[in-house]
Image (cartoon, rainbow, N blue to C red):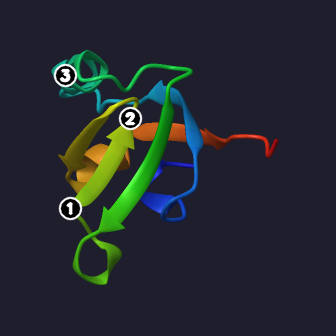
Amino acid sequence: MNLDQVDLGSLYCVSEVNAPKGAPQIKGQLEDIGFLPGEQVSVLRKGLLGKGPYMVRIGASTFALRKSEACMISVECLPHV
């Protein structure tokens, strides 16, 4: 699933960043701010009608992402401990 589809407040693990073929630099930009495979991520808030922007916590940092950016980030559910 992609980051724009997750439940608020739940923890997920980044599995991959999928940039569009016409804009490969976006993948590098998202990876530079911490969206790397294996990192824990959660969506804290979604904008009006859930369409963005998304307030996202990755590691100890919080970022706002557009819906188009959140759609590029594939995540997996973390197992409950």
Secondary element type, mark 1: loop
Q: Specify the quadrant that holds the C terminus.
A: top right
- Mark seen at residue 29: 3
Tag 3: residue type?
Answer: Gln
Q: Earlier in the sequence, mark 3 or mark 1?
A: 3
Q: Earlier in the sequence, mark 3 or mark 2?
A: 3
Tag 2: residue type?
Answer: Ile
Q: Quadrant of residue 4?
A: bottom left
Q: Residue at x 20, y 53 (%)?
A: 66
Q: Residue at x 43, y 20 (%)?
A: 36
Q: Is residue 78 left or right of residue 57?
A: right
- The percent coordinates of residue 38 (x first, y second) are 56, 21
Q: Residue at x 26, y 27 (%)?
A: 30
Secondary element type, mark 3: helix
Q: Residue furthest bottom?
A: 49
| Residue at mark 2 | 58
Q: Residue at x 51, y 20 (%)?
A: 37
- Mark seen at residue 53: 1
Q: Nearer the viewer, residue 2 or 47?
A: 47
Q: CA distance from mark 3 to mark 1?
A: 17 Å
Residue 46 in the image: above or below residue 67: below
- Mark seen at residue 76: none
Q: Is residue 61 left or right of residue 35?
A: left
